[in-house]
Amino acid sequence: MLAEFGHFSLALAFMAAMVAAAGLFVRDDDKGVALVRAGASAQCAALLLTFLFLILAFIQTDYTVQLVASNSHHDKPLLYKIAGAWGNHEGSMLLWALLLSVYGVVFAHYSKINKAQLKIAIAVLGLISVGTLLFIIAASNPFLRLDPAPIVGRGLNPLLQDPALAIHPPILYTGYVGFAVPYAMGIAALMRPQLETTAHKKWAQEMLFWTMIPLAFMTLGVGLGSWWAYRELGWGGWWFWDPVENASLLPWLIGTALAHCAMIAQRTGALIRPILVLALLAFSMSILGTFLVRSGVLTSVHAFAVDPKRGILIFAFLCCVLGGGFGLYILKNPVKARLIDWQTGSRPSLMVAGILMLSVVTVTVFVGTIYPLIMDAIGAPSVTVGGPYYNVTATPLGWLLVTLMVAAPFANWHQSLWHKLPFNEATDIAVKSKQEQSINQHAEYKTKEDQVKANLDGLVTSLKLVLVPIIALLFALLFYKAGLGQSILFAIAVGFVTLVVIYGARHTPRTITGAAMLVAHGGIAIAFMGMAGAAFFSSESITSVQEGTRFVSSGHHIRFDGVKRGEGSNYTYERAKVIIENANGGVKTRMAPERRWYSAGDMVTSEAVIKRNLISDLYITLGDLRVPGADKADWALRVYHRPFISWIWLGCVMSFLGALLSVIALFKRKVVARSHNYEEIGVKEMANQVIGKPIISDTAMDAHVEGTKAITS
Amino acid sequence: MRPKIYVTLFNIMFSFCILAFGSFTIRVLAVDGVAFAGMLPSNFIANQSGSDNAPNSPQSDLTLDSQKAQLTDQNLTAEEQRIAKLFREIRCPICVAQSVAESDAEASKSLRIFIREEVAAGKTNTQIRSALSERYGPSILLRPELRTSTAFLWLAPWLALLTGIGVWYWVHRRKDQPPKS
């Protein structure tokens, strides 16, 4: 019965989505908004129920449901039974729809854009839901029954039986799906255009808020995916330039560009058109990702089912989203380009450069991803675009991008970075405005806030005192271990981090926004350092070993003590005993890489073991038996030495936290804006409330000045 | 006055970044790219540091054998580096996105032995690549060759970059014009 209930509530959700989508055709008044809100809420409730029923079917391992029979097995651990609900095509599409409706409800109740736009945006989200649910009901219904029911299920792909993978799809989908909100806001802005600069700023701030949320989850999702690949695929690599990985990178790149565009726009009211384009593109990239993963045009662990009908339907959906969005953009381009006095080298100018660079990287990854598909489709000789291609094209752009990321926060909003160079200091002081001087005087006052500031400065100084010798030591070590060129490159990567932390902490305003920027950028810098370190200092070896073999690999003395066979919960294994010794023969660590054979699905996987610390990972996998049947078995043991690799994920998590901080800061502003009508209160109080007092930094003062201009113009 | 030490620190670091970035890009683009386009002998990098070491025993398919395990890439002979690089550029024939260096499949093992033999026989990278490409089709190369059918693939990033630079100049050029009211 449960499956039928699920089926029924799925249909109910579809009806509710139709109600929400009907909002496109009703009048722009409170009743219209109430209607779409009700539709969105009902849809979300119905989908929550549907998903609950699906999970229940998986927990009960009800083999009369086709999806359960082909994706689950009764001897799986409970966690993977539940995760199995979204570890397959149908379930993950349902998760997609569910998250979309959750976004819809939250957006419907917490968005601060004007009524007319709000109504349209919720209706557009409803329309997207209608499309998704139609696809689920027509081409990938999770509740189809099976008769006769099999006695055992086919089980979940063993590669996916991993805790990181259990939470990976929900997090990644929270990112993917979330870009539907900026898309809907973009469509709404095109259909109900606003013309005043103040309205643009407010709208851009909303856009930033709703972009930051999916972007945060996207960061975490991409990081988790790569962490899983590193641990589970057993090749010692962390990014494979697999089309599916690229598909998750594309929305991240576009989303990052969109967020930074919105940051400029919320202060200047300019760049509305690029925001619209990027918002439309970000969601299209999400759908493209879904298309690539779900249509079966690619072969990978993610392509659960190959069904041409699904591919065609998703492709049609993609065309509707792209065509509808850009058609509307071309037909009703509402905003005239605003002229801004861009000072070359000022912060917005460098941010624009960064946004463009992100777009260039996106184009590169996009072309590299779809080129083989297009070549196949037109019948040209097939090509493979792999890591070496991206190393030549995307990597140098990545260096440029990180340089910009580091440079931009140092630039003033109205003044070129050029003026901060030492030989320009005289000019700098001469042009320094009276405002800034008064800020400096203000900072001398012995208020409580100044006390805090002084403490922070002290902290930064002591950090510097500790960090500098450590980094110097690190360099010396590296220089000793590796060559000059690579050490220099790595030194630069380290320099990025030091710069962001020390200089950035000194000069960004002590607000949540400032902290968010520091943490997010610091995270990216640390991840970048990890990437550079892993790329430059990695080493690996394959050694043919017998019981008792001793060998040295990347400075580790390794002893191989044979292989034990046994049975796990739903697999049999061959477990190697590998012992890491001290130079004098004492045991340092024991490691046990495994090869597993899953009877359900007849699959062999290799379970790597990783001994990690902050500086480097030792990663060992057990290869196959080289001389089967011989007296003394001969195994292939792969030992990978991966320096700095954990920094990549450390940075990802840090970046995620930074983005969350930014969401919190933006939410605080929304609350302030809600309790006071923007236009009615004085600019100064507003600036104080929004940014936090006292105004001690030029950034805050810039915002203050901008605000004044906005109100008076 | 605020201390200016940070500014100086930043300047040193920034100029350093720009310099190093330049050299890095030039290395990757010029040496690899040019060698790739066939204007330089493709074993240019390998030949720089004299590769007249005795060739390895081609019987082993192992990437690095245990005698040489005291390693970072520097400690390897130029020849070993060249072989490792080749391994990373050839796709495992039966896998999806794995290179020969990463794969444990039988097909990859035989390819590793083949590449070692070819290197020992004194073939250049280009010769080895094209031999493999003839035998398995061009999709065996993880870095596609520059041909007419892949011209767009190689041009796209640079076209995008040029467009980006163009847009940036366009954005900044407008400040000279009086704003329309």
Image (tube, coloured by chain):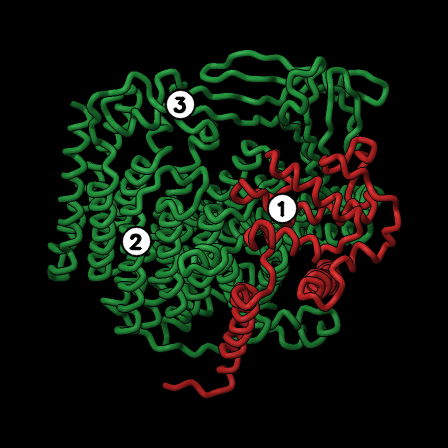
Chain colours: A green, B red
Quadrant (top left/top right/bottom left/bottom right) for the N terminus of chain A: top left
What residue is drawn where x is 53% and y is 71%?
B159
Quadrant (top left/top right/bottom left/bottom right) for the C terminus of chain A: bottom left
The front one of A233 and B35 is B35
Q: Is residue A563 left or right of residue A599?
A: right
User: What is the chain letter for disc 3?
Assistant: A
Q: Say whether disc 3 or disc 2 marks the residue closer to the N-terminus.
A: 3
Q: Residues within 10 Å of mark 1 (few under 14, many from 20)?
A: many
What residue is drawn where x is 14% and y is 39%?
A12
Give the label on residue A526, or none: 1
Q: Can residue A476 be spotted in the picture?
A: no
The residue lying furthest to the front in this view is: B135
Helix, strand or loop at disc 1? helix
Q: Are marks 2 and 1 on the same chain?
A: yes
Q: Can residue A590 be spotted in the picture?
A: yes
Q: Is residue A28 left or right of residue A412?
A: left
Q: Nearer the viewer, mark 3 or mark 2?
A: 3
Q: Residues within 10 Å of mark 3 (few under 14, many from 20)?
A: few
| Residue at numbered disc 3 | A79
Is A157 placed above or below A177 here? above
Real-space Cα separation, disc 1 to disc 3, in angstroms: 32 Å
The front one of A709 and A24 is A24
Is B76 placed above or below A624 here? below
| Residue at numbered disc 2 | A674
**Residue A280 image point, x, y percent:** 35, 61
Helix, strand or loop at disc 3? helix
Is A393 placed above or below A650 here? below
